[in-house]
Amino acid sequence: MTYEFSIKNFDELTSVDLYHSLKARSQVFVVEQNCVYQDMDEVDFDCLHLIAHQNQALAGYCRIIPPEFNTLKSNLSSSMSTDAPAIKTSTTAMPAIGRVLVLAEHRGDGLARQIMTQAIAHCRKRYGKKTPIIISAQTYLLGFYESLGFVPEGDRYLEENIEHVKMVLYVAKKTKVKKERVDAPTATTKILGSLLFIMAALFILGLLYLMI
């Protein structure tokens, strides 16, 4: 299925955008998960809101929290991950992606992956390609986020009685491919070359002798 994506800050959201986004969040995170909690928070004002539409109807959503407003911090030592850059990640400000949802009627056709791919690409473009991205993932989605490159860190914890784990997406270091070295001519090769040269010289001398 084909979806259209838009990303807006809070002030750019229309009243219709805001209504359907909050309705979807309540439907998925409160009603479907049978979890009574305050979904709307003050963070929404500072977030970027990514919305997936199909035929102008909201199908999926997530929000991006800019580094300066994100309180979710990484505590994973860079030495524990081969993908982690050589920086102290615990003190690195990074954007967070959250409230990722796909409405029930649109599940099963890869929309969640498209939403995350769009969100990651936007974070890379806006905050830098080398800036890590952090999420608080529900543990039943651990495999999904790992398939996108996120690395779990720390212990699992309960958030609104649902098990979560922090996950960070690093930028994999590029490794230089070493060019294969062309070995110098071996002694055997040198000897064969010398023999061929001598044989050629003798052949030419023989021809000259016959012509005299």
Image (cartoon, rainbow, N blue to C red):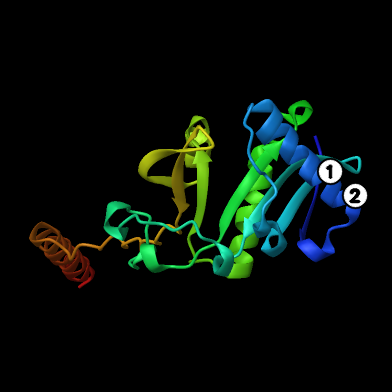
Quadrant in which residue 192 is drawn: bottom left
Residue 106, position in %: x, y?
76, 30
What amino acid is found at the position of numbered circle 2 in the picture? Val
Q: Residue at x 33, y 66 (%)?
A: 86
Check disc 2 and report its element: helix, strand or loop.
helix
Residue 175: quadrant of the picture: bottom left
Which mark identifies residue 192? none
State the quadrant of the C terminus.
bottom left
Total number of numbered discs in the rendering: 2
Which quadrant, please, contains the N terminus?
Answer: top right
Q: Pointer 2: residues within 10 angstroms few (<14), some, or many (20+)?
A: few
Badge number at residue 20: 1
The residue carrying pointer 1 sits among few (fewer than 14), some (14 to 19) or many (20 or more) residues within 10 Å by Cα, namely: some
Residue type at numbered disc 1: His
Q: Are marks 2 and 1 in contact (CB under 8 Å)?
A: yes
- Residue 58: percent from the left, percent from the top? 83, 41
User: In terms of image quadrants, where is residue 52?
Assistant: top right
Residue 151 vs 96, above or below: the answer is above
Q: Is residue 139 above or below residue 134?
A: above
Q: Which residue is mark 2?
A: 16
* Cα–Cα gap, marks 2 and 1: 6 Å
Residue 83 locus on image (x, y percent): 38, 55
Q: Nearer the viewer, residue 175 or 167?
A: 167
Residue 123 seen in this snapshot: yes
Query: Is residue 193 rendered to the left or right of residue 120?
Result: left
Residue under the point 66% across and 35% down? 29
Residue 95, percent across and down?
55, 61
Task: Please indicate whether residue 133 sits to the left or right of residue 179 in the image.
Answer: right
In what element is the residue under mark 1?
A: helix
Residue situated in front as seen by the camera: 153 or 206: 153
Residue visible at 59% across and 52% down in the picture? 97
